[in-house]
Structures are given as structure tokens and as C-alpha cells.
């Protein structure tokens, strides 16, 4: 059956495929004619898709259906959604009906609701985010540099403190050593005096 030129190729192929009795073991109309069924997704993808759509990707086929407004029909049994893993999958669209190919031209591909202004706003938001990230990155680098400087200054202070402690310890050792050595001899030949004894004598004389 010849279709209106306004009907997209995907829909024309789909209609022909569902109408063809030779492919009923893979895909066919429902009993009511208001939907169609893919009886076995695996075999349909392997045997039919390559012939009609030049690929064997079932997920891609379903995405195409979704883009044209088809929806998967869920069967509810006692309040539970029932879907067999390898069983038939049913798809429906208000303008895709058995024997009514004249309705096909009413099926339109979904278009994005995004307006040019929205893209501009998103671009501005993205620019602001990137600017904020750059600012944070710059501040982080500045903080890292400052921390590095403080670390080096701290290490230098500790080295200086360590050097001062060593010098202090060395001076203490010298003082202790010098205070224990004789430096004067009595004229009468008595035992030599030590520095601490001299200080003691001076203290007595002062009294």
C-alpha cells in the first residue's frame, strides 16, 4: 500500500511490517487492531530488524517507537503488572491502527521542548559555574602556596631552636667543666683554689 509522502520512512516500514502476514510469527496486530505485538524480541531483532531497519538492536528500535509517541502496553493481572521475560511485547499509538494507514501522517516525531533562550540561560549558568570553579581553584592554589611557605618557615624555626639548644647544652658543659678546674695557686703552697671557692671567699670577706 502506498503511503502519503508526509509519513516518515520508519513509520511506513513499520506499517508494512505489521501488515505483512509473512512476518506474523515475529510481529502482528493485536486482536482489536489498536496495537501491535512483537512476539519474540530476540528472534525479531535477529531475523527482521536487519531486513527492514539495517540493524539488529532491539533497544534502538524501541527508542524509535518512543520518539514517535508509541508506548508499551502493560497488562495488569490482579493488581500486579505482568510482563513475561521472553513473551510478547505490545506497543500502541492512537494513530497506528489496523486498516487505517491514513492516520499515519498524524504521527509526529517528538521535538525537544528546549527553546534557544533556555540554551542561552544554560550556557550562562555553565559559564558562571566554570568561573566559580576557576576562582575556587585559584584560591586553593594560593592556600597551598601559603601553607608551603608556613611549613618551610616552621621547619626553619625548629632547626633554629634545635641549634640554640645544642649551643646552650655546649655552653653548660663548658661552664661545668671550667668551674671544676683549678685556676689559682696560694703563695703559701696550699692546695689550689677553684672558681667556686673564690666566690665563697669573696662572700665571706664581704660579710
Image (cartoon, helix red, strand yellow):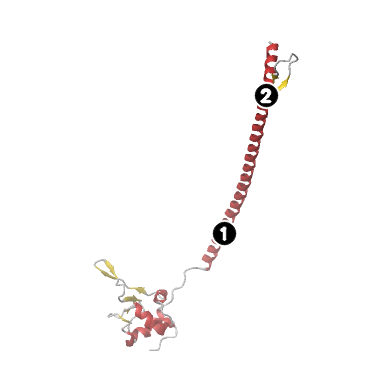
Q: Residue at x 32, y 75 (%)?
A: 89
Pick the front one: 17 or 204: 204
Quadrant where the image shows the C terminus: top right
Pick the front one: 194 or 26: 194
For disc 2, the neighbor class at 10 Å (few under 14, some 14 to 19, many from 20) is some
Q: Residue at x 72, y 22 (%)?
A: 183
* Front label number (2 vs 1): 2
Pick the front one: 3 or 26: 26
- Kindly give the residue lying farthest to the bottom in the view shown: 1
Residue 184 spot, x, y in % from top left: 73, 20
Residue 179 is marked as 2
Q: Is residue 189 shown above or below 99?
A: above
Q: Which residue is mark 1?
A: 130
17 on left or right of 165: left
Residue 63 spot, x, y in % from top left: 41, 74
Residue 135 spot, x, y in % from top left: 59, 54
Quadrant where the image shows the N terminus: bottom left
Q: Determine which quarter of the picture holds residue 198.
A: top right
* Number of marks in picture: 2
Q: Is residue 127 visible?
A: yes
Asked if the residues shown at circle 2 and circle 1 are in contact, with their CB atoms under 8 angstroms apart, the answer is no
Q: Is residue 186 shown above or below 116?
A: above
- Kindly give the residue lying farthest to the front in the view shown: 189
Q: Determine which quarter of the picture holds residue 69.
A: bottom left
Q: Secondary structure at mark 1?
A: helix
Amino acid at each position: 500500500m502506498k503511503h502519503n509522502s508526509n509519513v516518515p520512512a520508519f513509520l511506513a516500514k513499520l506499517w508494512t511490517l505489521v501488515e505483512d502476514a509473512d512476518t506474523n510469527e515475529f510481529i502482528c496486530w493485536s486482536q482489536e487492531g489498536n496495537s501491535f505485538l512483537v512476539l519474540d524480541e530476540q528472534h525479531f531483532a535477529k531475523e527482521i530488524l536487519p531486513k527492514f531497519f539495517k540493524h539488529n538492536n532491539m533497544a534502538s528500535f524501541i527508542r524509535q517507537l518512543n520518539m514517535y509517541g508509541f508506548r508499551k502496553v502493560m497488562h495488569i493481572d490482579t493488581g500486579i503488572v505482568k510482563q513475561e521475560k521472553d513473551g510478547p511485547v505490545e506497543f500502541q499509538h492512537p494513530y497506528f491502527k489496523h486498516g487505517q494507514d491514513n492516520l499515519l501522517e498524524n504521527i509526529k516525531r517528538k521535538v525537544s521542548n528546549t527553546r534557544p533562550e533556555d540554551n542561552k540561560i544554560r550556557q550562562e549558568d555553565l559559564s558562571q559555574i566554570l568561573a566559580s570553579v576557576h576562582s575556587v581553584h585559584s584560591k586553593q592554589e594560593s592556600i597551598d602556596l601559603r601553607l608551603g611557605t608556613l611549613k618551610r618557615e616552621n621547619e626553619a624555626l625548629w632547626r633554629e631552636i634545635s641549634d640554640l639548644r645544642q649551643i646552650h647544652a655546649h655552653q653548660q658543659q663548658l661552664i661545668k667543666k671550667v668551674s671544676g678546674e683549678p685556676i689559682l695557686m696560694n703563695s703559701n703552697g696550699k692546695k689550689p683554689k677553684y672558681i667556686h671557692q673564690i666566690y665563697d671567699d669573696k662572700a665571706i670577706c664581704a660579710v
